[in-house]
Image: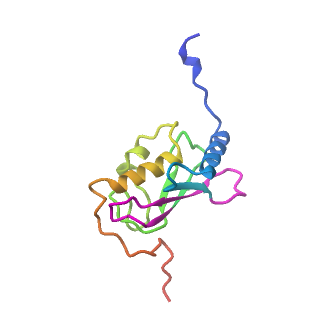
C-alpha cells in the first residue's frame, strides 16, 4: 500500500457542513465572516460573506458584503464570488461586482482543498496590496443592483 490511497475525498455536503460550522464559530480576528444565505437551501449553494476593510487602506472601516455561489461541482470547482457592496479593486468587475477569476489567482488556480474562508481572507489581503490600498472608492452605502430609478 503506497501513499496513493491515503487521500480521502470528502463528499460535497460534508465539506459544506464543515465550512458552515467554521463560519458560524467566527474566524480569526472577526474581520472576515461567512454563512449560508438561505437555511432552507438543501444544496447549500448560496452563501454570504462579509469583509471589514483593513486598516491603513482606503477600505478601512468599510463593511463589504459578498455573495458566494457554490455550484454542484464545488469544491472541485471554485464558487462564483460577487461583491454586493460597491468596491474599486483590480480583480472586481466595476459594473457587476463579480470577482474575475482571471484577475484573482486563487480562483483561476483553484485547488479542492481551498475554502470560502480562504477566498475571503485572500480578498482582504488583496485590499491591502499596493495596487488596491489607495484606489478611490465609490461613495459608502452604494450597493450593486439596488439603485432604483423613479
Q: Is residue 126 magenta?
A: no
Instruction: Classify residue 128 as left or right of residue 114.
Output: left
Q: Is residue 43 magenta?
A: yes
What colour scheme was applied to this rendering of the protein? rainbow
Question: Which image quadrant: the N terminus?
Answer: top right
Residue at the image point whose x is 58% and y is 43% from the top = 73
Give the x, y percent position of residue 36: 63, 56
Give the x, y percent position of residue 52: 46, 61
Q: Nearer the viewer, residue 26 or 87?
A: 26
Res 135 quadrant in image: bottom left
Residue furthest top as drawn: 1
Q: How many marks?
A: 0
Instruction: Classify residue 86 as left or right of residue 130.
Output: right
Residue at the image point whose x is 54% and y is 17% from the top = 4
Res 37 quadrant in image: bottom right
Instruction: Classify residue 27 as left or right of residue 10.
Output: left
Give the x, y percent position of residue 128: 34, 55
Residue interval drawn in magenta: 37-65
Residue at the image point whose x is 38% and y is 51% from the top = 125
Residue at the image point whose x is 62% and y is 50% from the top = 25
Q: Is residue 7 above or below residue 35?
A: above
Q: Is residue 103 above or below residue 110?
A: below
Residue furthest bottom as drawn: 150
Give the x, y percent position of residue 99: 42, 56
Q: Main secondary structure of the magenta part?
A: loop
Amino acid at each position: 500500500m503506497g501513499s496513493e490511497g491515503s487521500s480521502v475525498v470528502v463528499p460535497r455536503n460534508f465539506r459544506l457542513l464543515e465550512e458552515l460550522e467554521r463560519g458560524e464559530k467566527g474566524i480569526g480576528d472577526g474581520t472576515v465572516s461567512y454563512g449560508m444565505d438561505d437555511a432552507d437551501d438543501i444544496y447549500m449553494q448560496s452563501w454570504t460573506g462579509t469583509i471589514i476593510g483593513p486598516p491603513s487602506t482606503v477600505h478601512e472601516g468599510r463593511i463589504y458584503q459578498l455573495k458566494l455561489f457554490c455550484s454542484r461541482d464545488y469544491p472541485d470547482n471554485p464558487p462564483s464570488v460577487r461583491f454586493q457592496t460597491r468596491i474599486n479593486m483590480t480583480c472586481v468587475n466595476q459594473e457587476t461586482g463579480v470577482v474575475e477569476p482571471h484577475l484573482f489567482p486563487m480562483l483561476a488556480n483553484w485547488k479542492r482543498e481551498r475554502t470560502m474562508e480562504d477566498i475571503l481572507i485572500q480578498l482582504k489581503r488583496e485590499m491591502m496590496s499596493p495596487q488596491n490600498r489607495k484606489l478611490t472608492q465609490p461613495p459608502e452605502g452604494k450597493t450593486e443592483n439596488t439603485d432604483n430609478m423613479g
